[in-house]
Image (spheres, rainbow, N blue to C red):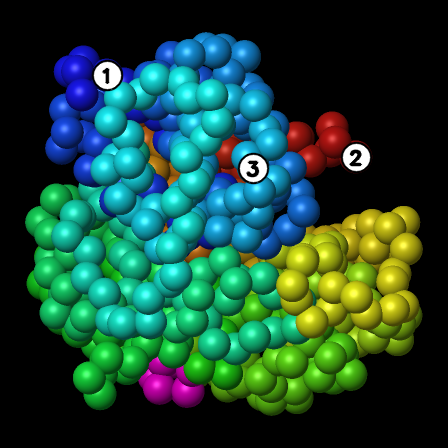
Amino acid sequence: MKTGLRASFYTFGCRLNQAETALISTTFRAADFEITDINKHADICVINSCTVTEQADARCRRLVRQVLRRNADTFIAVVGCYSQTAAESLKKIPGIDLIIGSQDKMKVLQYIDEPAKRPEPVVVLNKMSRKPFTIEATGTELPTTRANLKIQDGCNFMCSFCVVPFARGRARSRRFEDIQREAQRLSAAGYKEIVITGVNIGTYNFENKFFIDVVKMLLQIPALERLRISSIEPATLTSEVFELMAENDKLCPHLHLPLQSGSDAVLLAMKRHYNSSEFRSFIEDGAAKVPQIMLATDLIVGFPTETEDDFTQSCVIMQDSPLVYAHIFNYSDRKGTATAHIKGRVETKIKKERSRILHDISEQKKDAFYRRFVGKTLRVLTEEMDGAATWLGYSDNYVKVRIENGQKLQRNELVQVEINDVCDGFAVGIVKNDANKAFAEATKTTCENTAEMSQ
């Protein structure tokens, strides 16, 4: 392959996909590719796909067309979950040159001899392994201050609405020592925060090492300053995780626990591994042991046969429990799942209205949670600038923070920030060492004026 080529990457979907894109791009950089932005000219464009919803499929198709409008000669490779479950559909989209399923997506570069357009795409779909795995590369190539660390892949839970076991295969775990190796390299590369990722990370199981053992091992890495757990199934955790959060400030007090519905009837139809009382008891235990914890969830509206009462129960648990916010999804049929042919569909307009109601509750809960920290100090990792002196970042417990006096700050710094207001979806504050009352009052006044103008 000739030198001086450029490659761009785009990731749809979850943190695991983000982690894998970072690893894939590392292999391209090692082969002397220049990594460029998706909106710029590239010889090769790799799209790491998602197929959780119909919308995810549609966004992937739109992106292919957008890339080709900018440069008709770009070699397009679509890899991952959408490729695994709908390769025949992708083959019908003009301009795609390579389609690779989940098993071989990390080796995409090996299937490109020369980035020349093909009359029809090459399709690589192999059976997914169930064996423990290792990852040779270290994902340090994407411009982020938080490194995603893949520890597991696949899922055995087979929830009735979910296509992930078909797209990702059955559960398998990464070798324990290989996780440790990459984590140490990521810390040495300057990452202050690592996020544990996978499909169903709580089911990690390798040679009598389990998920909590991975957490404890990572907490012992001296250079690592923050460890965050990404979305994790509530049925795979025990209260030990809350005890670790309470005693070790490296472990971020933040959990994203997919509930999916507040109705026991719906949870049963979904084939979830808990009922609403068990879920609620678990998060209440967490809130009691770790008072500053942010607890988030996923909720699906419009699941087949979901009644108004079922939906009300989702609203109640969102409103009255320690949950802080929710990602709301409209139910989407996925081919091959158990619910794909169930009768009793919920109308689209009803799903949209239910989604709006839950979204409003979520926003109110998050705003109230943020306001709990006004007058208090949060540790924030600076991620991106928003003006000449303003930095944006996340606290340990995943509060979005806007730092108003960041003239002296740089990217990827952990700083103590005094919160003085909540404005436009951010907790607003100033670096503690530079704090002064006049600046804080000015910032608060600005936020109050903005709020009045928006009313």
The residue carrying pointer 1 sits among few (fewer than 14), some (14 to 19) or many (20 or more) residues within 10 Å by Cα, namely some
Residue 409 sits in which quadrant?
top left
Q: Please say if 255 is above or below 424.
A: below
What's the distance in space between the residues labelled 3 and 2, CA to CA? 46 Å
Instruction: From the image, state whether disc 2 or disc 1 is nearer to you.
Output: 1
* Residue at figure coordinates x 42%, y 82% from the top left: 237
Instruction: From the image, state whether disc 3 or disc 2 is nearer to you.
Output: 3
Look at the image and give the residue range highlighted in magenta: 237-245
Q: Earlier in the sequence, mark 3 or mark 1?
A: 1
- Viewed as shown, does residue 155 lie left or right of 323? left
**Disc on res. 455:** 2
- Name the element at disc 3: helix
**Disc on res. 309:** none
Q: Please say if 215 is above or below 27.
A: below
Q: Earlier in the sequence, mark 3 or mark 2?
A: 3
Residue 69 vs residue 309, the one in the foreground: 69
Look at the image and tell me whether residue 277 can be seen. Answer: yes
* Residue at figure coordinates x 64%, y 51% from the top left: 53
